[in-house]
Image: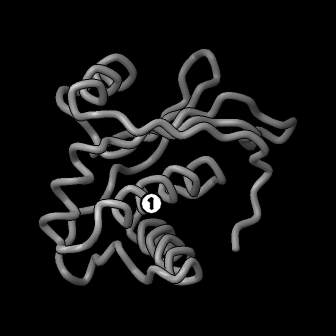
Amino acid sequence: MLRSPLRELSLAVVPGRQMAVLHKKFLHKTGPTDVLTFELEHERRGRAVSGEIVVCSTLAKARARQLGHPLSHELLLYAIHGLLHLSGFDDRTESAFAAMHAKEDEILTRLGIGPVFAPRSGRLGLHAGRLRLRNGVRKCRSS
């Protein structure tokens, strides 16, 4: 399903207020974002081998309600999105965006859930990209 050198992963689900604090602290942006991804350790070739994904329960709940699917599906989408970033996927260009979200839907389909991200229905995208900080931590850059 996904080939990645990632060996260790933690996932935190936080409310909007806490996500807004993290978003401001690490990306200097106001308000919550859906997902932040931190690359914690890297192998010799620079690929992440351990990381952390932080997802926002408040935004996931609102989005799930808006799209009419279970909260658990939206949270899983956010977690998979972060996992893909940790595995080297990016979504800053249109083609990379399409490839990344197709991979999300492929994984969700193989898990028996089916596509959750629906760009054809006008869904706004999740955040785009990663940011490398001085200490080597990378995180998703929100849109």
Q: Where is residue 60 shown, x and y percent of the image?
A: 27, 53
Q: Residue at x 70, y 67 (%)?
A: 2
Q: Nearer the viewer, residue 114 or 141?
A: 114
Dividing the picture into quadrants, the one containing residue 35 is: top left
Tell me the quadrant of the picture where the N terminus can be found: bottom right
* Crowd band around label 1 with a 10 angstrom C-alpha radius: few (<14), some (14–19), many (20+): some
Residue 108 lies, with reference to residue 71, above or below; the image says below
Q: Residue at x 24, y 27 (%)?
A: 20
In depth, the one of 111 and 1 nearer the eye is 111
Total labels drawn: 1
Front-most of residues 31 and 108:
108
Q: Locate residue 76: give its quadrant.
A: bottom left
Give the side of residue 1 with respect to residue 23, left or right.
right
Q: In the rendered image of this protein, does residue 124 appear above or below residue 103?
A: above
Q: Position of residue 141 (x, y in %)?
A: 39, 39
Q: Position of residue 30 (x, y in %)?
A: 18, 26
Say if 91 sits above or below 121 in the image. above
Under tag 1, what secondary structure? helix
Q: Residue at x 49, y 70 (%)?
A: 104
* 48 sits left or right of 126 in the view: right
Look at label 1 and name its amino acid.
Answer: Leu
Residue sitting at the far right = 44
Q: Position of residue 124 (x, y in %)?
A: 21, 63
Question: In this image, 25 relative to 113: left or right?
Answer: left
**Where on the picture, by quarter, is residue 29?**
top left
**Residue hosting label 1:** 76
